[in-house]
Amino acid sequence: MRKSIALQQELGPLFDITLDCEDGASAGNEAAHARLVADLAAGDDNHFGRIGARVHDVGSPFFAQDVASICSIAAPRLAYLMLPKADGLQDVLTALTTINHYSQPAGRTALPLHVLIETHGALADVRQIAALPQVQSLSFGVMDFVSAHNGAIPGSAMRSPGQFNHPLVARAKLEIAAACHAHGKVPSHNVTTDFKNPATVIDDARRAATEFGYTRMWSIHPDQIRSIVSTLSPASQEIDEATQILQKASSVQWGPIQHHGVLHDRASYRYYWCILQRAHAAGAPLTEAVKQWFQPPSSPTSTTQH
């Protein structure tokens, strides 16, 4: 956990850190581990406010304990809580009731929730889950999802290339991404377990983004983070094209333009604006003119005449 926090301090807020109470705590040490997670999220090392925590599932005796401990200490600084193994919409609603019960008295209204979609029930309710205002992101849990099929899906579908080729797994990935984009939420792709092979991580991130519409991806090891951030960031050629098109459009008050013989109007401007938003979030180099678009408007100052 501390290694990931140190890397975030080095690279900046280009990625989030999820401190894990579900699989990260040893048996019998759940309460102490939750307090450690809360202290790290609330502490001075959380420079950017981009540290969240994964709690136990709602059926676990440790779920409410995790939420109470973390929220009482870290709610104001916590980026989000993550819920694993939801069986459907009702589990997410139950989780939100508990989270709000503990986070609101600690000074945090509507603490964002990230939901892992890794069961049949959660996939069936995925659009309703994505529509919940407090849900910020949905992640695919490929290993639990494959295991839930009791051997009907081969183990090769937990990793590449099978995870992109098996129809049931590909269908799940697509439904999660589509639900997220329909409701303005963030789809986050599952981990690559082959953490010793950077080429596999890069290829998985590329396919997740270009073929399945995922805009974020989990890492299972800090060594994967740079590769994922780089692969999911727009290429310099895309950034240059978006810059040229939007600067032309701005010069004609966002009316139609032609660029290299291709017509563009407000429909395509939205796409290119998303490219620049992603580039800005990833810390990619931008022209000074484009940087100005991301500056908050200056507050008017009042003057007193004498």
Image (tube, grey):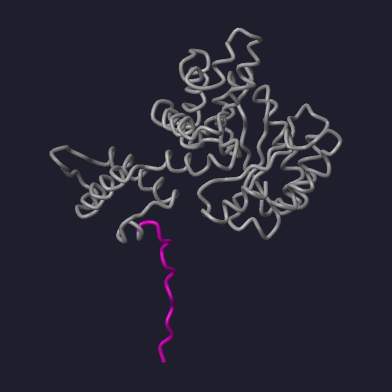
Instruction: Kindly indicate the quadrant of the structure image that contains residue 301.
Output: bottom left
Q: Quick one: 221 or 151, which is closer to the camera?
A: 221
26 sits to left or right of 141: right
127 sits to left or right of 73: left
Picture coordinates of residue 215, whole percent (x, y): 46, 36
Is 187 situated above or below 74?
above
**Identity of the residue furthest to the top in this view:** 152
Picture coordinates of residue 200, whole percent (x, y): 47, 30
**Identity of the residue furthest to the bottom in this view:** 306
Quadrant in which the C terminus appears: bottom left
Is 247 situated above or below 28?
below
On whether residue 243 falls in the magenta region, the answer is no
**Identity of the residue furthest to the front in this view:** 196
Q: Quick one: 216 or 8, which is closer to the camera?
A: 8
Q: Quick one: 196 or 47, which is closer to the camera?
A: 196
Instruction: Kindly indicate the quadrant of the structure image that contains residue 113.
Output: top right
- How many marks the image carries: the answer is 0
Picture coordinates of residue 88, whole percent (x, y): 65, 23
Dominant SS in magenta: loop
Q: Quick one: 137 or 164, which is closer to the camera?
A: 164
**Identity of the residue furthest to the left in this view:** 261
Picture coordinates of residue 111, whole percent (x, y): 65, 45
| Magenta range | 293-306
On whether residue 300 falls in the magenta region, the answer is yes
User: Which residue appears at 49% of the width and 44% of the height?
Assistant: 226
